[in-house]
Image (cartoon, coloured by chain):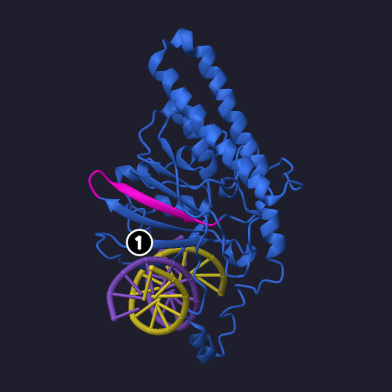
Chain colours: A blue, B yellow, C purple
Amino acid sequence: MGCSKPAESLPASKRKRAIEEITKGLQLANQLRSLLNDSLEDDVSAPAKDLIFKVLSSFTNSLTILSSDDVSQLQANAHGHKSESSRGSCRNDISTIKDRRGRYKRRKNLQVWIRDTPCLIDDGHAWRKYGQKVILNAEHPRHYYKCTHKSDQRCRAIKHVQIIQKDPPKYRTTYIGHHTCKTFLYDPRSISDPASEDSPFVLESFDCTITAGEQNHLFTSYFPSTKQEHKEEKTSSNPINPKQSSSSPDYDLLSPSHTTFDSFDYEAIFSEFGIGDVIPGVMDMGLDFEDDISLPF
DNA sequence: GGGATTTGACCATA
DNA sequence: TATGGTCAAATCCC
């Protein structure tokens, strides 16, 4: 998470606007980069590309700085929140526990990130599956994951994974809410939490077959592995069902050093290198945590 | 034995 | 009321 000091003095509304503007700038810079890629010869466009690269980096850093206080705010606001782990910890009152079953507040208006990928991706966070549901008119069930650190660090991030297309394979991963856990195993210089991303977006058609050179360039400094995630993805041919045995070619792509990344940098990196499309989302940006945690915007 | 996954039941929302 | 989201006991696996 950010080593940079957040823009704490900035009012939430202004900060939100600033982020929106920067996000817009990021998109425009991306368009410019695409134009440069299309229209100019390499030797001519190299300086321009370099410039664009710096502009994109600058926007990315700005977003990181502006967003980096989300977690501290969340944790501060979460003070006094009833412990998740206390739920059901006392097994001698089963009837009481059963009575409470399913009593929860459904999350809504959370920030959402959607990724459509031809293979499953390791986002660098540890997830625990907590449910699976057959979705109407969907060929494959949806799988529900929450952050492993939900109980010990009250991290509220969850994700849903669903196969939306079989041939060619297409997985839709929906990230909901921000990671508030501090267990980041990655290089803190490079990694920012999804919490840093202030604009929901849809990533479409991420190409898992980028070259090794590109992968090294993109990921080498970014990602060691998450033990649990790595294990999960290595031991499963069906990435959505980790318990099944493994030999899927798709899954071979999931070397953690190559595919582990955080969503925010995911956008930044792939924007910068022109891999995959970043499409701004239109989803509600508000937050409505069940324990009244709220982001400043 | 402890942590992760499975799965049926319950609840919220449209 | 149908559907999706979450819970938690049972089960599995290392």
- Residue A92, quarter of the rendered image: bottom right
Residue to which mark 1 is pinned: A142
Per the image, label 1 sits on a secondary structure element best described as strand
Question: Can the viewer see residue A247?
Answer: no
Q: Position of residue A224 (x, y in %)?
A: 55, 42
Is A38 left or right of A80, judged from the image as shown? left
| Residue found at x 64% / y 73% | A83
Front residue of A149 and B13? B13
**Residue ranking furthest to the left:** A167
Is A95 left or right of A136, judged from the image as shown? right
Q: Which residues are magenta?
A: A166-177
Q: Is A270 part of what is drawn in magenta? A: no
| Residue found at x 55% / y 57% | A286
In the image, residue A158 above or below residue A275: below
Front residue of B3 and A7? A7
In the image, residue A160 above or below residue B7: above
Q: Could you tell me the amino acid type at mark 1?
A: Arg
Q: Position of residue A116 (x, y in %)?
A: 37, 46
